[in-house]
Image (spheres, rainbow, N blue to C red):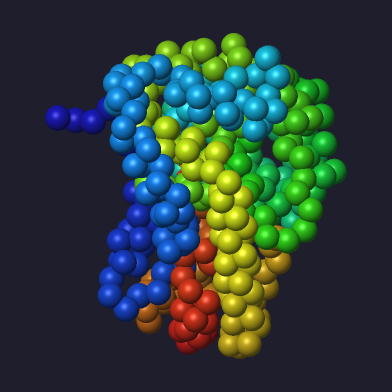
Amino acid sequence: MRPATHIETLQPSYIREILSAASADGVISLAGGLPAAELFPCSLLEQAMTTVATQKNVFQYGETQGYAPLIAHLQSTYQLDERQSVLVTTGSQQGLDLIARAYINPGDGVVMEAPSYLGALQVFTVAQARIETVPQTEQGPDLAALAGVFATGNIKLFYAVPDFHNPTGVCWSLQTRLKVAELCDKYSVSLIEDAPYRELRFSGESLPLVSSFCSARAFVLRSFSKTSAPGLRLGVVTGPRDWLIPMVRIKQAADLHSSLPMQAVLLEILKHAEFADHLKNVQMHYQQRYHALVNGINKHIQSAVSFNTVEGGMFIWLELSKGNPEEIARKALAEGVAVVPGTAFYPGTNAASKALRLNFSHCSPEQLVVAIKRLNNII
Ligand SMILES: Cc1ncc(COP(=O)(O)O)c(C=O)c1O
């Protein structure tokens, strides 16, 4: 049977191809966006699962919006007032998909930074949005370009990852946050603030959510994949109460609700006194790994490369002074190290990026140094 026409607009995922090759024996992978499995909160999960196993009510069908005690907990953790509400989703990826399905008509204008998170690019492509991009600077989106594209008057949504961007690691400055909120208000553009890495800050000062400056026109996507474990497949969307109603209807058609036992398990671990220590432990290890990667680059990469320091998240964006990043990524794989070429993170096929995305959360500090030495052989 012939698939629906919009499926043909989806490009094959270079990352998926690399990731399957990256799992081969002997390959050190800096390619994926995987958290460190050895840091998953397994003992908290075990206790929580034992507790939840006795709760018959959570093994029944439940409410589409989510497990009520979890919603109440999140409503208070995120300090949402009565105008804001929570929808529990199957990973934050589903939250993004539900926003697109509920709000995007074919041809609607959606702005993203370039480069951008591939999963978002795929969602907006399937929704047949008209995707516009603005360049990214060290402080966040290029504000003049953003104002220019908003001023055209036909932009509905701006999708952004202000905290430790995937793929670049950029964290928006406070001034950028304020200005973007102002521009969204001025041009009546709705914001999707995707924040899966926000809790992974290991240095510097936490900055307010952009949406805290324009909460009446913003969705926030949160994920428990990086703070707990991605296999739980849990995330949430928060936003104006009435904005979530069409999304609840679509989620009902899609999967009735996200797994209730997993939501109950998540609630148990979030409420546990040791969860804060678990998070600190993850942050500390990621900081060590980040330093191992950076020291490895400074010590072992002999050609001219550059990168911006990061204060959290899971990635750095290594700019090469010469060479084709796709060819380098292919050759690096043969040398036993997987990385993703920057070109994979742009819409279309003729991106001019000379960068590589390097993940530092998944491998041990020792493996990261070996990976960098191998990479040096190629670049
Ligand atoms: C920016 C961004 N948004 C969303 C997601 C999806 O996260 P989840 O596992 O919650 O679906 C990812 C995953 O890597 C991501 O990098």
Above/below status of 263 relative to 63: below
Q: How many marks?
A: 0
Residue 332 as seen in the image, left or right of residue 8: right
Q: Which corner quadrant holds the N terminus? A: top left
Above/below status of 75 relative to 360: above
Nearer the observer, 1 or 56: 56
In which quadrant of the rendered view does residue 177 lie?
Answer: top right
In which quadrant of the rendered view does residue 290 lie?
Answer: bottom right
Counting from the top left corner in percent of width and height, residue 309 is at 71, 66
Nearer the observer, 79 or 297: 79
Q: Which residue of the protein is positioned furthest toward the left in this rendering? A: 1
For the point 36% across and 35% down, the residue is 52
For the point 40% across and 17% down, the residue is 63
Counting from the top left corner in percent of width and height, residue 161 is at 63, 43
Above/below status of 132 relative to 338: above
Q: Which residue of the protein is positioned furthest toward the right in this rendering? A: 175
For the point 42% across and 60% down, the residue is 37
Nearer the observer, 332 or 241: 241
